[in-house]
Image (cartoon, rainbow, N blue to C red):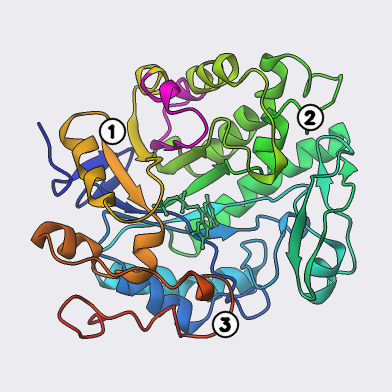
Amino acid sequence: MSTAFEPVIAGSLKLRNRIVMAPMTRSRANGTLPTADTATYYAQRASAGLVITEGIQPSVIGQGYPFTPGLHSSEQVGAWRQVTDGVHAAGGTIVAQLMHTGRIGHPSTTEAVGHGALTPVGPSPVKAAGQVFTPTGPQDHVVPDELTEDQIVATVADFADAARNAVAAGFDGVEIHGANGYLLHQFLATNANRRTDRWGGSPENRIRFTLEVARAVAAAIGADRTGIRLSPANGLGDTAEADHATLYPLLVAGLDTLQLAYLHLVEAGDPSLTPTLRAAWSGTFVLNAADGDTSGQRRRLDLVTSGRADAVSFGRLYISNPDLVARLAAEAELAEPDLSKAYGGDHRGYTDYPTVDGTRPAL
Ligand SMILES: Cc1cc2nc3c(=O)[nH]c(=O)nc-3n(C[C@H](O)[C@H](O)[C@H](O)COP(=O)(O)O)c2cc1C
């Protein structure tokens, strides 16, 4: 029996404990560049067994929100170096989450960073219900341009290039964002993917894009430093998955043959599927458990002790507890995050959360 405070191996990643910082978009980039504050924020949280960054766009068109960073230019690679150096100096392990937002985006967002007003892309020209945050506030989603076959192949290559850039920037690996209603998830979803070619229709066809991205990233940087995040049936980004109970076991079995570093499951839509997916996965299994509000989340540690997961991730509690591992180990009080400062703004609500003894974390 292992506890969450013991190390675990995930491919070539050596996690010093099984408490993972979940990826969180914080919308504080300078244009599309991480800043010195970004470096401070992640270094403060380096005692996590694994730090997963906020979603990072692998291409210009992959950017869905203002002030999110990229990994598709040499300037961005250079700016990430301060982040990876900071985490490594603190003894931590950090991977970059590669997030292409697909149809969730807005022309005004790419325009604001000097790339012109680009229409977001998706598997099919199906607009997501609801609104997206833009440089001028929330606006309705737009109808995305349907990716051509050639563009699909080019998008797969963009993920591989961004993964190479991540390694060049000093990251220990990448996490492919296949969750939460973004591009990969849109291909999986029955309502967002209406294609009739080999990328749509049957579950076998709808998982193809995710498998191709995973294969390409693994070929680019090594499967042993490639993780992937999935969120069966969580409905985010207006995704509906009529056949998730069939599709995800198929997808996870396909991914399992690639021998990736880890699978990061967001358990929200259908927790009853988790044991099936865990059984279909022979590698390291990281669970982001569906347990609602942050009070009582220390119970997640039991998921490791009971063997339901190899590691557990925490999102919101990592906003407000830079020393979350130490607090959990000491059974100390956990601070609640101020979610009004989750997205955008300055260092407030970002790097100014104290450690449990009232000091700012030593860097
Ligand atoms: C402010 C904020 C930003 C988020 N951004 C991302 C993201 O960029 N990528 C991602 O996969 N999940 C993102 N999430 C989801 C979290 O990783 C996590 O799955 C979710 O918060 C539930 O876990 P928790 O109960 O530990 O907070 C975000 C969540 C929050 C609160």
Circle 2: element type:
loop
Residue 52 to residue 28: above or below: above
Disc nearer the start of the sequence (1/3): 1
Disc number for residue 309: 1
- Which residue is depicted at the point 63% across and 64% down? 70
Q: Mark 1, residues whose alpha carbon is within 10 Å: few (<14), some, or many (≥20)?
A: many
Q: Which residue is mark 3?
A: 345
Q: Residue 276: where, in percent of width, then height?
A: 40, 17
Residue 360 to residue 317: above or below: below
Quadrant of the snapshot with the N terminus: top left
Q: Mark 3, residues whose alpha carbon is within 10 Å: few (<14), some, or many (≥20)?
A: some
| Left or right: where 16 falls relative to 183 | left
Q: Residue 17: where, in percent of width, then height?
A: 20, 50
Residue 261 part of the magenta segment? yes
Q: Residue 270: where, in percent of width, then height?
A: 49, 27
Circle 3: element type:
loop
The amino acid type, in three-letter code, at marker 2 is Asn
Q: CA distance from mark 2 to mark 1?
A: 31 Å
The amino acid type, in three-letter code, at marker 1 is Ala
Disc number for residue 193: 2
Q: CA distance from mark 2 to mark 3?
A: 35 Å
Q: Mark 2, residues whose alpha carbon is within 10 Å: few (<14), some, or many (≥20)?
A: many
In-front residue for pair 21/147: 21
Q: Residue 153: where, in percent of width, then height?
A: 77, 36
In the image, the segment drawn in magenta is: 255-275
Circle 1: element type:
loop
In-front residue for pair 333/226: 333
Q: CA distance from mark 1 to mark 3?
A: 35 Å
Disc number for residue 272: none
Residue 136 to residue 152: above or below: below
